Image (cartoon, rainbow, N blue to C red):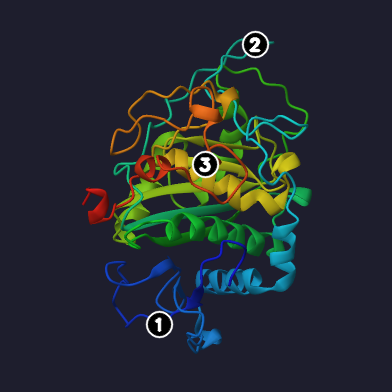
Amino acid sequence: MAGDIDIPEALLAPAPQGQVAMAAGLPILHDYGLAVRIGVSAESTPQAPLDEAALTGQERLGLHAFRLRLNQSYRQAKENRPYTSSSWSGTDGQPQLHRDQRAVIPPAAPLADAPDAPAEGPQVRRLAGRIAVGLVIVSGPGPLAMTEAQQQKIVAEVQNGLSYLGGQAPARDVTFAYDIQVVQVDTPDTAGQEPTARDAYEQFEAPWRDDALAAIGHSAGISGIRSYIRAIRTAKRAQAAYCAFFTHYPLHHFAYCRGEYLVMRYDNDGWGTENLDRVFAHETGHVFGAPDEYAESGCDCGGAHGVYKRPNLNCENCAEGGGVSCIMKRNDWTMCAETPYHLGYTMTAAAGDA
């Protein structure tokens, strides 16, 4: 087993040259390139032989992340992760996972121009088929630099989190196809800066993010993010795409989703780096339409969420007994009966959904 998600995974045989590994009929969870693909498999499946010297940088990151997840020390760290089963609400002394990303901050100076509104969701809002995932790991000067060990840790945590989400798909049809960009920028540190803009999230995020977008050939702002997402969706022949930025730069909040993209700070606030995987999985849930289920989010049992337009029946404020544990409610690898529909999984024929 890799990590702590109780799903048998194995390194699969390299894909034929010039072909893209498709998920239909294949138990592929992670596609880092022709040579490195990781899938659900019998535990007795032998690991595929690799010419490691010929791997691309991205394939090498994916392989090293998988090997890290196989280590007993990695799994023990997951067993001892802080705040297991705690609500994402920030009770019991842990940090609150969410804030209102569109809150207006009373200015100490004249307001900056408000940025373009964040997108409300990906072009295809469904966690099914091939999903292109852009990981933009932003390394800054001095203490803001991302070490090789931290880059590997990020890829391993994302892999662990998405193995859980992909492994829960009833049809076993979810494949995450990666575009990993490790970007060096010289943006000055903004530590100690006070929020003064209407959109404080944009105020803290934009300087280093726009420099990173320029470094990978895209324009600034939401238009550049959308351009990048469209590009990886096309390149990976995916049904949907989103991206995530990881950084050491100060943020208005340590982890959040803004429609088609996520932003996460490496230290993950008080949740710690051993919870990067579950925070990433939770935020990915929002990308595909899953609502928060903990009481402090202000949720209710109504609404029409995700591609199936299902209500939020596990909302802690109104579900019987407060509902059950779920990745959208608590720091657990669990999923309530409604979240699979919110995510837009391809449901089994027995469930009446094709």
- Can residue 138 be spotted in the picture? no
Which element is circle 1 on?
loop
Disc assigned to residue 14: 1
Q: Is residue 307 above or below residue 141?
A: above
- Percent position (x, y) of residue 115? 47, 24
Which element is circle 3 on?
helix
Given the image, on which type of amino acid does mark 2 rest? Pro
- Percent position (x, y) of residue 212? 55, 47
Question: Dot 3 corresponds to which residue?
Answer: 283
Foreground pick, 36 / 159? 159
- Percent position (x, y) of residue 332? 60, 47
Q: Is residue 133 above or below residue 107?
A: below
Q: CA distance from mark 3 to mark 1?
A: 31 Å
Disc nearer the start of the sequence (2/3): 2
Q: CA distance from mark 2 to mark 3?
A: 28 Å
Q: CA distance from mark 2 to mark 1?
A: 55 Å
Q: Is residue 219 above or below residue 100?
A: below
Foreground pick, 325 / 209? 325
Q: Residues within 10 Å of mark 2 (few under 14, many from 20)?
A: few
Residue 118 is left or right of residue 152, and the answer is left
Q: Residue at x 47, y 85 (%)?
A: 45
Given the image, on which type of amino acid does mark 3 rest? Glu
Disc nearer the start of the sequence (2/1): 1
Q: Residues within 10 Å of mark 1 (few under 14, many from 20)?
A: some
State which quarter of the image contains the N terminus: bottom right
Question: Dot 2 corresponds to which residue?
Answer: 107
Residue 185 is left or right of residue 59, and the answer is right
